[in-house]
Image (cartoon, helix red, strand yellow):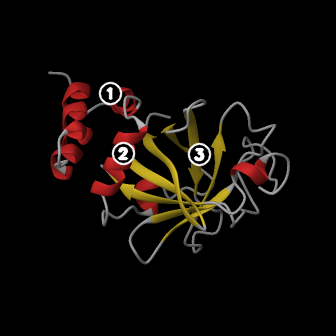
Amino acid sequence: MSNVDTITQLVKADPIDVDALEAACDAATHEERVAATRLWSGKLQKKIFDATKGRAVTIDQMVPTDEPLKEVIHVGTNTLPAFRHFEKRFCRPSDPSKPFLIGYNHNWHWPFTTPGYYEAYEDESGELYIDYTREPTEKPDEWPPLMTNRTRLGYLVYAGMVDKMRKVSDHITIGRAYKKKEMNAWFVLVRDDGQ
């Protein structure tokens, strides 16, 4: 049985054995992790998010390098009916004492919306918050220009939004979007260490 098949069986089980799922995801290659998570429907993503409650995500997990403004790419799949594939790109700020990450959403439609810039930080609950209400003031040179999430169509997509992240495995996190209350919108990220 392939690693993709093993991961698929584990997420379809009821209840999910989260420790077994973590081990299977850790044993897979990056390509297998992406292939497996792209099979996760909205219903499965919700189920995984619920099953991973209390599993903390750290800044170090999202960006395992100390190098300031060094990009780390996370390949994403969301539960929207279209445009399901995207990337979230993270880096550490130039000041290492700042307890947050900088990031944006990399996709084809950012010129029409905005890049969806955010700061990401660890919450007291152990969840990592991707907070679009906290907009960075710096970025790597190769990233799109900084702009507020309240411009263009960004006010419909990103303004006022916070994503709450939970750990699936070392490379995989699962998130849910909130705008004052829970939204019926989940997504999974797979960190790519191969850059």
Using a 10 Å C-alpha cutoff, classify the residue at mark 2 as few (fewer than 14 neighbours), some (14 to 19) or many (20 or more).
Answer: some
Q: Residue at x 30, y 67 (%)?
A: 54
- Name the element at disc 2: loop
Which circle marks residue 154 in the picture? none
Residue closest to the eye, 184 or 177:
184
Viewer can see residue 64: no
Q: Residue at x 78, y 54 (%)?
A: 155
Q: Quadrant of residue 84?
A: top right
Q: Amino acid at mark 3?
A: Arg
Q: Horizontally, is 45 left or right of 59 in the view?
A: left
> What residue is shown with label 3?
89
Calculate the distance from the C-alpha at mark 2 to the C-alpha at mark 3: 14 Å
> What residue is shown with label 1?
32
Residue closest to the eye, 20 or 183:
183
- Asked if labels 3 and 2 touch by Cβ distance under 8 angstroms, the answer is no
Q: Position of residue 49 (x, y in %)?
A: 36, 53
Q: Residue at x 37, y 26 (%)?
A: 35
Sequence order check, earlier mark of 1 and 2: 1
Calculate the distance from the C-alpha at mark 3 to the C-alpha at mark 1: 20 Å
Sequence order check, earlier mark of 3 and 1: 1
Q: Amino acid at mark 2?
A: His
Q: Looking at this rendering, what residue extends furthest in the top direction?
A: 1
Q: Amino acid at mark 1?
A: Glu
Sequence order check, earlier mark of 2 and 3: 3
> What residue is shown with label 2?
171
- Asked if labels 2 and 1 touch by Cβ distance under 8 angstroms, the answer is no
Q: Quadrant of residue 45?
A: top left
Calculate the distance from the C-alpha at mark 1 to the C-alpha at mark 2: 12 Å
Q: Quadrant of residue 57?
A: bottom left
Q: Position of residue 79 (x, y in %)?
A: 50, 39
